[in-house]
Image: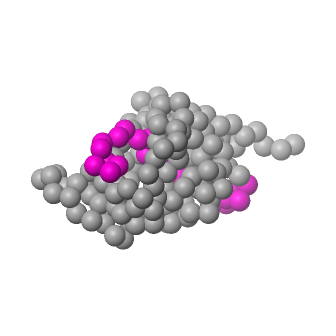
Amino acid sequence: MSPMIEVASVHTDDLTPSDVAAIRGLLAAAFGGRFDEHDWEHAVGGRHALVRVSGVVVAHGAVVPRGIWIGGVERLVGYVEAVATEPGEQGRGLGTSVMRALADEIRARYRIGMLSTGEWGFYERLGWQRWRGPTSVRLVNGDVVRTPEEDDGIMVLETTAGLDLDATITCAERAGDDW
């Protein structure tokens, strides 16, 4: 008998303490201890896709609202954070299930989905495109600083046509990783 796989979409406010503990443990294992409190803060305030196998959370991702300036115009995007699969469960399509659930959330609530990654192939096969334009960050004092180390690391999921993938994109400064 194969294990029961469940995919659920849950708002941060509706996560139980045991859900949060399971997700945090999963993220710690998947990121080898490199997932810190700032990373977790970036992943709250939106919707979480949870994949459970026989009741145990084995994959996770979140989409949160975030203001991003595209060509100088601020747009509200669904920003993907904290995507991970339990190391022993990788390669079974569970991460794909998470990203499909998050794409559904993005299509329902936003015109644009965005994320930062070095794993382009995984996301490209799910319809995400690489951002070709330069990246920057808007500091708290209003200054805008280029972030060339982030160029080619941003990906976008368009829910409507017409996005200029060569435009400059800017995110607001935040604790931990800006992008």
Q: Is residue 14 magenta?
A: no
Where in the figure is residue 100, as x and y percent of width and height?
63, 43
Closer to us: 145 or 9: 145
Closer to us: 116 or 85: 116
137 on left or right of 150: left
Closer to us: 74 or 80: 74
Residue 137 sits in quarter: bottom left
53 on left or right of 120: right
Where in the figure is residue 65, as x and y percent of width and height?
39, 38
**Residue at the location (28% across, 49% down)?**
72
Q: What range is drawn magenta here?
A: 69-92
Q: Is residue 29 visible?
A: no
Residue 139 sits in quarter: bottom left
**Residue at the location (46% across, 47% down)?**
163
Is 170 above or below relative to 103?
A: below
Magenta stretch, main secondary structure class = strand
Is 133 above or below relative to 101?
A: below
Where in the figure is residue 97, as x and y percent of width and height?
66, 45
